[in-house]
Image (spheres, helix red, strand yellow):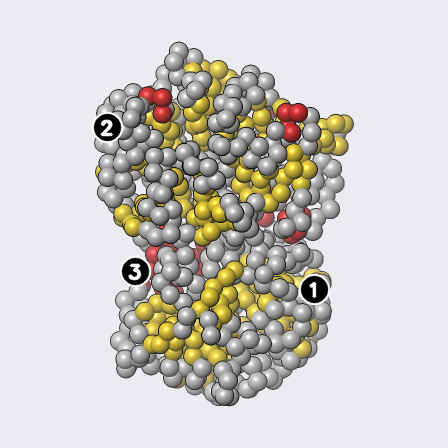
Amino acid sequence: MRRTVRRGRVLTAVLALAAGLLAGSPSAMAAQPVERAMSVAADPYTWKNARIDGGGFVPGIVFNRSEQNLAYARTDIGGAYRWQESSKTWTPLLDSIGWDDWGHTGVVSLASDPVDPDKVYAAVGTYTNSWDPKNGAVLRSADRGASWQKAGLPFKLGGNMPGRGMGERLAVDPHKNSVLYLGAPSGKGLWRSTDSGASWSQVTNFPNVGNYVQDPSDTSGYASDNQGIVWVTFDESTGTGTNATQTIYVGVADKENSVYRSTNAGATWSRLPGQPTGYLAHKGVLDAENGYLYLAYSDKGGPYDGGKGQLWRYATGSGTWTDISPVAEADTYYGFSGLTVDRQNPGTVMATAYSSWWPDTQIFRSTNSGGTWTKAWDYSSYPNRSNRYTMDVSSSPWLTWGANPSPPEQTPKLGWMTEALEIDPFDSDRMMYGTGATIYGTEDLGKWDSGGQFAIKPMVQGLEETAVNDLAAPPSGGAQLFSALGDVGGFRHMDLTKVPSMMFTSPNFTSTTSLDFAETNPGTVVRAGNLDSGPHIAFSTDNGANWFAGTDPAGVSGGGTVAAASDGSRFVWSPEGAGVHYATGFGSSWSASSGIPAGAIVESDRVDPRTFYGFKSGKFYVSSDGGATFTASSAGGLPSGDSVRFKALPGTKGDIWLAGGASDGAYGLWHSTDGGASFTKLSGVEQADTIGFGKAAAGASYQTLYTSAKIGGVRGIFRSTDQGSTWTRINDDAHQWGWTGAAITGDPRVFGRVYVSTNGRGVIYGDTAG
């Protein structure tokens, strides 16, 4: 799972968001001149997720310390969530983030106010390098995340950067709750707010901005950024009433100087004496009752790397340091990160080996303040394991990955990237922890100590965290929808309200980049994707229920785009690392196409099985011989870049719609009725990034159009039932989901239903309220 999750999460976010930068970055959002004003109607829609449940990394879980059952989860690219105890589900809180602010769907830290539980704070921003053009912000809410106010910051934050599992970087003073601290990356230091997050200023006398970078040689700035200030922890025993807490501990990404302390409410700071060196402190969790600060150390910043680690306990009264590592340093092949104290029984502490990828993660538990430890699993006789837990993933059955590993590996795994670990402060039996794919939890944790097996199950319903690369809704067959996803590959969605039993397998792509079905024979489906070793293309002849791998042409390094002939008799594939190819049958052998450049986007005509289309760098290409040869169209005025999506209309040969562009050139929506020989730009559509078709409206002969676009000066999801003459905005400001520029499709069977791609909030679908 290690490189699957690693490459999937990074590449999905980077590639999808790189496309977002081209298609609609804030620096490129100036509207083009509009030929005529267009009035835009609105239609109320209901919005839901096509259920997958999870699908991405959950680096932080935060319980409120003063109100029972109030908990939050943060994701690296997909926003934040609040726990709903009555339904045991998560409610998304940041769907109102719009296109211009897409980076604010990455949450690097959360803080729930222990004095006023209605207040919650989120530090947002996805990348600290050029991939995210906007600075970060601290969002504040007085209604538990139902609505937000924003305080902009003069630097970027990295919700999807290395080190994002450390924390929490954002903290509220447990006595004087108008005071908050935020640890910044990139050498920007420690920041403080004294007005409940409305404004922020740097703590200029804080002595260390951090110096640890994952990879100094990374010229992209992704792995070469200083991970900075990584957590803030208050000692609540040093405050009274509404007076500021006096003692504050701060974790710094500096292996020689990782912990600092103030004993005068932040007036002065000093390095905590006697501390261990050579490691990064991922977490600092305080047990004020017994006077212990626990620290989880790793040699790397995570969430993927980490080869050595230690656990330490600092006695706040005497200043004594004790190595309480459950495993000798020499025997670790992982770092420690997840760290929690049982607030009902503060001598009980737990920690995770977050970077133990093989054979599994490990969770450690002590009931005597770290004096001795037990493990979630151990070897009975290698390679056989004895587990203190049972796992039931029947609610998310795909978590087995369809695997059948040899011992000591098991499926489902206990987890990986386990940096979030929290015991409910009001319930010693409840624990939740985040993984690279879900949130697991238990409600009978006490069985750990009594000799029984505690039951682990997914506690993730409502939290949808997949990045969507492509969508396809067939006109018939058992599948309502096919999704191409990062990290988990994608699914055949039979019932949108139920979690699919398994992702696409045989092969399991780390990310599926493109998929298509044969329009007149939708039992035939093809998908292309990324895989570290193995084929990059797969086929199905039973509407996506079962799959078999094709054969790659020489040089293929990634999935690219793929198109199925309308009758399923042939395929055209434009993979990464090789030019455009075509095949008859199911890809047992491929031939190079001529007349079309490598890297072109390819699609099929939905009527003529021998007609295929391509687009690259402002040129449209047409093949009438099954993809063997392409000819460049003379059509001009199309977007010069490659941030384009286009589709051919089902039922009519040569009817093509093309969306895309950038504000420094052509940007909008184009229509061709002559097979791409010429295109007409739709006036009034200032920007468009996706195009899809769905069932025609009652009385209409032409299919319904859907697009993620800017029309009438408004960014949103739009529908047209009259070939683009007029448009209706169908989302609203509360439902924007950041960047929605990868794919869109209507449902050919249900009028008004639309499926929208997001970059981290899964597959959204909407139905007209009427």
Name which residue lies at 54% across and 47% down.
88
* Labels 1 & 2 near each other (Cβ < 8 A): no
Front disc: 3 or 1: 1
Residue 354 in view of the camera: no
Residue 125 x/y as whole percent: 36, 48
Report the residue marked by disc 2.
205
Where disc 3 sits, the SS reads helix
Indicate the amino acid at tag 1. Ala
Front disc: 2 or 3: 2
Residue 338 left/right relative to 270: right
Judge whether 268 appears above or below 523 on screen.
above
Question: Which quadrant of the figure has residue 630?
Answer: bottom right
Q: Residues within 10 Å of mark 3 (few under 14, many from 20)?
A: few
Instruction: Tell me the number on the disc at residue 27.
Output: 3
Q: Residues within 10 Å of mark 1 (few under 14, many from 20)?
A: some
Indicate the amino acid at tag 2. Asn
Where disc 1 sits, the SS reads loop
Name which residue lies at 59% across and 53% down.
488
Quarter of the image that includes the N terminus: top right
Q: Earlier in the sequence, mark 2 or mark 3?
A: 3
Question: Which quadrant of the figure has residue 670?
Answer: bottom left
Q: Residues within 10 Å of mark 2 (few under 14, many from 20)?
A: few
Name which residue lies at 45% across and 31% down.
282
CA–CA distance in space, label 3 to label 1 = 43 Å
Where disc 2 sits, the SS reads loop
Q: Earlier in the sequence, mark 1 or mark 2?
A: 2
Q: Nearer the viewer, residue 238 or 101?
A: 238
Residue 44 left/right relative to 767: left
CA–CA distance in space, label 1 to label 2 = 61 Å
Q: Nearer the viewer, residue 397 or 191?
A: 397
Instruction: Tell me the number on the disc at residue 545.
Output: 1
Residue 196 in view of the camera: yes
